């Protein structure tokens, strides 16, 4: 007997909890080897029946091995006696029968599994996708806020009075997550109720006034900040909390803004204005008590890199440095970008990523169209044709720059349409007046830039016209999202020319994803990544929007340096017919003061006679 046989006999019937190094599936290999040896011994015994051979086998100890192999099954099934390996060391025999898998669960585990499957079915029904650990269960009605999170009945009644009869998909999942103090990144279509999804938990968590800001909401534009402020005032009627928005930060009103911030519980602002106040030495504002930071339109905030100067991302870094380390952050947007996701994974602990519907897709309630106009002059004709067919106001028209907005406004001003324009060059009072008039209905068509494409809620917008092609698919989603809000239907028409083929495929794929019909050739256009990146940094050059025939400017020839040196100075002749300029001599730069008009005429006659005498006969 060799060492392997001894090891085999000593370890028969034992199971090792830890896997032996260098061996895989040791139990199965040992069983197979034992069976082969038993079969071989039986054949040898059948061939050789002599007592001498049997005795030789018994002397070598192999016969005992055969007998033990034959009776091993009976011994293991019938006896559970301990096997003594050495003195003082015993091992119990275990049956080699396969262990049956536990198919039955305990009542508690079964109940948890059923509840989890029910929650997943409910999320799939409303198109909610949640990624993270220990995800909170969604609410089915606003009354669940009272039973599960002790939200006051008055606040729930205020929510219903504001027009929210039942929770929207993003509100069903975001409300419980924020009420439990989880940090989230929420992506939902435009007009899906994201503002109320973060304002209601904030107002409940703040409770009673405590003096000093405890919640901060940042957004990219002033118009969006005022819109959130109006919504916060409506939802906070049943509470005693004070909400404020940072308005103009002129030097004369800095102290006034400082006092309002100190008295407020909830602050709504743009990053630029807040950074301006934080960087001033004569302003003493502390944000250490801030518990929640909400960033609306977060994808716009994280555009560009941290190294760039005067960007939203750099301003956001200044604000984050002034907050406490234990603050919680929630990001809301209609589109999801890689830079946003990367920052959230790096800085937010216990993150939950919420997505409603298809990511980076336009609203399904908007009927989207693409209209080819040939060139820039064809766009104005196409828009006037839309007016002739009949426009159902209010209408939003997007252009790429404020200069083009002014040009289009001049063209449409005398077409019998109540039209106005809003852009960055207009004062804050003018912009507020235009927005107010558009909401009331005094303005039918509003021409705007990318300024109004983010978050502004104009209820009842029936038509959005992309006069200039959007620079990216994300910009297109936000523009189109101004129509079809709160479940209403809308329409979006996008003009494109031969110069806009670069981004045509990306926008056509967004339209197809939202359920619109798109020609197949648009989806097969080759894309040039370099030209797309160039368009994101700088808008393309477009012809002027005008129907007035203008005289072309003559090309001015560059003057040589030698001519400019030799050229004499000129002086205006006051008594001449057309006030022409006259070249003066280098020595006499001005006419002699001592000469009279009559003397000057005599000298001129003498010069003329001299010139005539010099002519050849």
Image: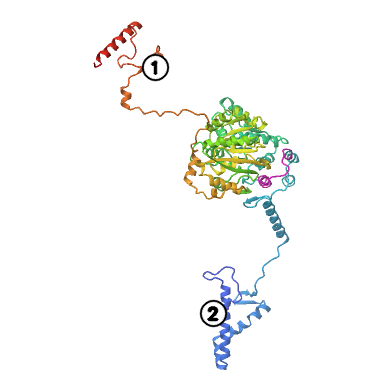
Q: Is residue 273 left or right of residue 105?
A: left
Residue drawn 50% across the image and 33% down it: 544
The reply to whether dot 2 and dot 1 touch (C-beta < 8 Å) is: no
Q: What residue is pinned by disc 1?
A: 580
Q: Quadrant of residue 372?
A: top right
Nearer to us: label 2 or label 1: 1
Which percent across, then down, holds residue 402?
A: 54, 32
Marks counted in the figure total 2
Which percent across, then down, holds residue 521?
A: 54, 49
Quadrant into which the C terminus falls:
top left
- Check disc 1 and report its element: helix, strand or loop: loop
Q: Is residue 273 magenta?
A: no
**Magenta region, residue range:** 159-180
Residue drawn 48% across the image and 28% down it: 550
Q: Nearer the viewer, residue 314 or 194?
A: 194
In the picture, the disc for residue 417 is none
Q: Nearer the viewer, residue 54 or 515?
A: 515
Which percent across, then down, holds residue 9?
A: 57, 79
Q: Residues within 10 Å of mark 2 (few under 14, many from 20)?
A: few
Decide if residue 330 is in sight here. no
Which percent across, then down, holds residue 222?
A: 60, 33
| 241 w.r.t. 580: above or below | below
Decide if residue 106 is in sight here. yes
Label 2, label 1: how far apart the Cα atoms are: 125 Å
- Check disc 2 and report its element: helix, strand or loop: helix
Majority SS type along the magenta span:
helix
In the picture, the disc for residue 5 is 2
């Amino acid at each position: 007997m060799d060492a392997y046989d001894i090891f085999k006999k000593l370890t028969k019937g034992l199971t090792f909890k830890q896997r032996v190094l260098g061996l895989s599936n040791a139990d199965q290999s040992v069983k197979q080897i034992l069976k082969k040896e038993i079969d071989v011994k039986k054949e040898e015994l059948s061939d050789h029946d002599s007592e001498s051979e049997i005795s030789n086998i018994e002397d070598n100890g192999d016969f005992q091995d055969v007998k033990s192999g034959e009776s091993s099954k009976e011994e293991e099934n019938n006896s559970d006696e301990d096997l003594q390996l050495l003195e003082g060391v015993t091992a119990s025999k275990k049956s080699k029968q396969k262990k049956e898998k536990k198919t039955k669960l305990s009542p508690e585990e079964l109940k948890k599994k059923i509840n989890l499957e029910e929650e997943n079915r409910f999320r799939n029904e409303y198109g909610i996708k949640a990624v993270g650990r220990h995800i909170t269960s969604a609410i089915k009605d606003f009354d669940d806020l009272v039973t599960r999170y002790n939200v006051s009945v008055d606040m729930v009644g205020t929510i219903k009075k504001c027009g929210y009869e039942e929770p929207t998909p993003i509100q069903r999942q975001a409300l419980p997550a924020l009420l439990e103090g989880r940090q989230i990144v929420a992506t939902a279509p435009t007009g899906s109720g994201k503002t109320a999804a973060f304002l209601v938990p904030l107002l409940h968590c703040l409770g009673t006034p405590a003096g000093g800001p405890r919640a901060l909401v940042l957004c990219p534009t002033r118009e969006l900040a005022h819109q959130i402020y109006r919504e916060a005032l409506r939802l906070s009627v049943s509470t005693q909390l004070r909400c404020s928005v940072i308005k103009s930060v002129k030097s004369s009103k800095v102290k006034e803004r400082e006092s309002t911030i100190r008295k407020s519980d909830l602050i709504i602002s743009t990053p630029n204005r807040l950074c301006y106040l934080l960087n001033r030495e004569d302003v003493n504002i502390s944000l250490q008590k801030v518990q929640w930071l909400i960033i609306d339109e977060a994808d716009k905030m994280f555009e560009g890199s941290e190294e760039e100067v005067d960007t939203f991302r750099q301003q956001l870094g200044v604000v984050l440095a002034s907050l406490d380390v234990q603050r919680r952050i929630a990001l809301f947007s209609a589109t999801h970008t890689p830079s946003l996701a990367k920052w959230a994974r790096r800085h937010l602990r216990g993150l939950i990523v919420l997505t409603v519907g298809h990511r980076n897709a336009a609203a399904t309630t908007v009927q989207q169209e693409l209209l080819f106009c040939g060139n820039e002059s064809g766009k104005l004709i196409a828009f006037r044709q839309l007016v002739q067919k009949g426009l159902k106001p209010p209408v939003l028209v997007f252009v790429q720059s404020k200069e083009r907005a002014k040009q289009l406004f001049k063209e449409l001003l005398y077409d019998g349409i109540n039209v106005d324009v809003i852009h960055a060059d207009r004062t804050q009072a003018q912009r507020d007046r235009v927005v107010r008039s558009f909401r009331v209905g005094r303005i039918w068509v509003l021409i705007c830039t990318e300024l109004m494409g983010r978050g502004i809620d104009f209820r009842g917008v029936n038509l959005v016209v992309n006069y200039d092609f959007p620079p990216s698919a994300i910009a297109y989603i936000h523009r189109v999202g101004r129509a079809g809000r709160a479940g209403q239907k809308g329409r979006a028409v996008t003009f494109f020319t031969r110069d806009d083929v670069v981004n045509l495929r990306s926008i056509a794929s967004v339209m197809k994803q939202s359920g619109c019909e798109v020609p197949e050739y648009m989806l097969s256009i080759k894309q040039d990544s370099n030209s797309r990146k160039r368009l994101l940094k700088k808008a393309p050059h477009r012809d002027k929007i005008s129907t007035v025939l203008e005289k072309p400017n003559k090309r001015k020839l560059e003057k040589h340096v030698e001519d400019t040196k030799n050229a004499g100075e000129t002086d205006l002749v006051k008594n001449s017919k057309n006030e022409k300029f006259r070249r003066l001599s280098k020595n006499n730069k001005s006419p002699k003061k001592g000469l009279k008009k009559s003397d000057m005429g005599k000298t001129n006659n003498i010069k003329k006679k001299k010139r005539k005498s010099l002519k050849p006969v």
